[in-house]
Amino acid sequence: MTFSNPWWSRWRESEGSLILHVDLRPDPEREERAVALLDEDERVRWKRFVHEGARRRFALCRAALRVNLCARLGCANEELSFGYLEHGKPFAIVNGVPSDASFNVSHSDRHGLIGFAKQDGLGVDLEVRAPGRDFDGIGSRVYTPRERLVLSGAAGSGKADLFYRLWSLKEALIKALGTGFSLNPSGFEVPGPMLEGERSAEFRFPHLPADPFWLEDLGEPRFAAARACRLHTPPTSPASPGTCQTTPSDTAAS
């Protein structure tokens, strides 16, 4: 499935990993094109959004996901639909048959991310930083004592940066696990090296010590962002994510 003038672009690739950035700025022409790609159920969902921004973000992200999944799965847009796991994580269905394609979507304000992987257990999160909130107060409900201690030591814009960095890391892990917020984010902690500033590390949920994940901080000046994926082979070095990613030949529509 080819697509001209897309509103998404390749954002991060390493060892075959692919994450797309989706431009969610207001654009009536783009949104009209996006809505035309949605199926009947998705259009019903799109119409239910009360706020214009929420409608736009849903349409643009879902349409971008559809185009790129069809390119990866070799199917027509009309052949693609979505099902949902117990806690709401979507999966692809092609001609009525569930696909094992692994993907995850996140959006905030005018930015979105779509991640792809070969194996299950992928989570991406993006958070546009909003200053002026009670970060310590919110953190007391969602962060561990050690995380709160690190947060309390930050000041000014650094506190907002750290709050959203920690939140994006935790939400990416929750999305990779697929449990939604039935898992309390204060019940697990960002790896120690990442609390000290490292950009990636291996992670294990306390209740699933035999199930390792690779966690990456992908934040940049425009937003905080993170990616987590289940490890299917051990890392070969502290900077290597093992085999939780796609192969270098995997491509997306453009």
Image: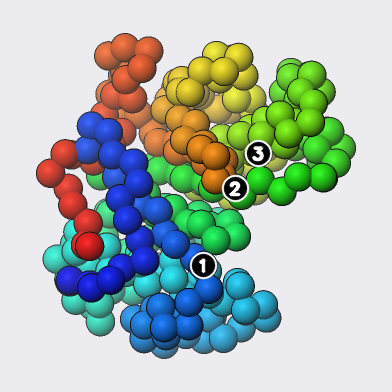
Where disc 3 sits, the SS reads helix
Locate residue 29: give its quadrant: bottom left
Amino acid tagged 2: Glu
Structural crowding at the residue carrying mark 3, measured as other residues with C-alpha within 10 Å and reported as few (<14), some (14–19) or many (≥20): many
Question: x, y percentage for residue 164?
Answer: 65, 39
Q: Residues within 10 Å of mark 2 (few under 14, many from 20)?
A: many
Which residue does the numbered mark 2 point to in the structure image?
Answer: 127
Residue at 33% across, 74% down: 81
Q: Are marks 2 and 3 in contact (CB under 8 Å)?
A: yes
Amino acid type, label 3:
Tyr
Q: Is residue 101 above or below residue 225?
A: below
In the image, 208 versus 229, the foreground residue is 229
Q: First in sequence: mark 3 or mark 1?
A: 1
Quadrant of residue 162 within the rendered picture: top right
**Could you say which quadrant of the image residue 147 lies in?**
top right
Q: Quadrant of the C terminus?
A: bottom left
Query: 198 or 178: which is nearer to us?
Result: 198
Residue at image point 22% right, 56% down: 252
Q: Are marks 3 and 1 in contact (CB under 8 Å)?
A: no
Give how far apart the Cα atoms at labels 1 and 2 are.
15 Å
Q: Earlier in the sequence, mark 2 or mark 3?
A: 2
On the image, the x and y values in percent for residue 122 come to: 40, 43
- Per the image, the residue denoted by label 1 is 25
Frontmost residue, 220 versus 181: 220
Q: Identify the residue under disc 3.
A: 164
Residue at figure coordinates x 45%, y 44% from the top left: 123
Residue 216: x and y, percent? 45, 30
